[in-house]
Amino acid sequence: MSALFEPYTLRELTVPNRVWMPPMCQYSAAPDGPSTGAPDDWHFAHYAARAAGGTGLIVVEATAISPEGRISPYDLGIWNDTQAEAFRRITRFLASQGTVSAIQLAHAGRKASTDRPWKGGAPVGAGTHGWQPLGPSPLAFDENHTVPTELTVDGIREVVGQFADAARRALDAGFEIAEIHGAHGYLIGEFLSPHSNRRTDSYGGSYENRVRFALEVVDAVREVWPDDKPLFFRVSATDWLEEDGWTADDTVRLAAELTTHGVDLLDVSTGGNAAGVRIPLGPGYQVPFAARVRNETTMAVAAVGLITDVDQAQKILANGEADAVLLGRELLRNPSWARHAARELGAGVHVPDQYHRSV
């Protein structure tokens, strides 16, 4: 059997293959009204197509734990029961196709309250469904972003509780895996990095203080997330800064700590916390960061970043650089990538009865 189509077990959950879909925001939820933040027909069709295409695990896009935790007014949320109920349609269908459903629980921090990317992504104000962002320190992401309000210690504790409440709702909605979003310069990543965290209290300064918030969130979520279900953490392995940023060494150190706090897999990405940095984009450019975590710790890892073709994905797994591969843009282009890859490799993959003529 090819490495891509070997099952993978974490705790008591088995994923049917190693072709996974990472969270990718659709910016398509209602910005106000009774269905604010709830998935709609677009979200159902989007995720259902990839499940029918044989994807083994789908991580639903960044889903805000509070209204002010959204990246944009058009993001998904899971801060109320109406939203949780709307997700059940998606999780039921994914389960019917043998696809494992995961959800990324997120807070956008200082990068919140922005428009949709195809509208320019600029900050939006109260007149256009916007709000005042929060952050670890009163430092804007760049000159175009709003200076965030610095979270108080009580505010930090409130956010930790919101992550736990969101995890409870995600479980009720039928998700099998929860992923905590600590990457791409959003709130948890902002606390991790000295580039964005200039606090002088117990949540800033030293490495130990800067990771405190992340570990508190993990502990709060793990407490309400069942022992038989896996917990993921997404990290930006580097800020891509020459100095005063989060580094690959920090990521390896954090991965070891997350293991002791009940995290089962690290979803390894990079960047997003510092504006204007030069990132050496290329096929698999983030894979070495995942490989380093896998080789230097006991943490399982998933690799992401311009992984597009079958041979490339196979080699990442065969070389021991990751336990699974996350295909983002390629799955946007081709929802049935997994079925096509299985055919090329002569491997087995779920095919809906309705598509039997495609085999």
Image: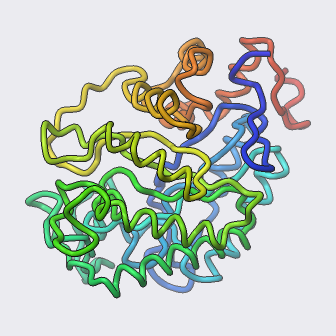
Taking the image as shown, residue 187 lies to the left or right of residue 24, namely left
Residue 348: give x, y in percent of width and height: 83, 23
From the viewer's perspective, is 54 left or right of 24? right
On screen, residue 86 above or below 210: below
- Quadrant (top left/top right/bottom left/bottom right) for the N terminus: top right
Q: Is residue 42 visible?
A: no
Q: Is residue 172 above or below residue 45?
A: below
Residue in the image at 52% along x and 64% along y: 218
Instruction: Give the quadrant of the C terminus.
Output: top right
Residue shown at the point (24%, 31%) measured from the top left: 279
**Residue drawn 81% across and 28% down?**
349
Q: Quadrant of residue 134?
A: bottom left
- Residue 175: quarter of image: bottom right
Residue 240 visible in image: yes
Colour setting: rainbow
Most foreground residue, 241 or 209: 209
Q: 289 above or below 313?
A: below
Q: Along the line of sight, which residue is nearer the eye, 106 or 199? A: 199
> Residue 84: x percent and y percent?
65, 74
Looking at the rendered structure, the number of numbered marks drawn on it comes to 0
Q: Position of residue 58 (x, y in %)?
A: 64, 46
Displayed quadrant of residue 210: bottom left
Residue in the foreground of this view, choosing between 260 and 52 = 260
Rendered view: 84 above or below 99: below
Percent position of residue 191, x then y: 29, 63
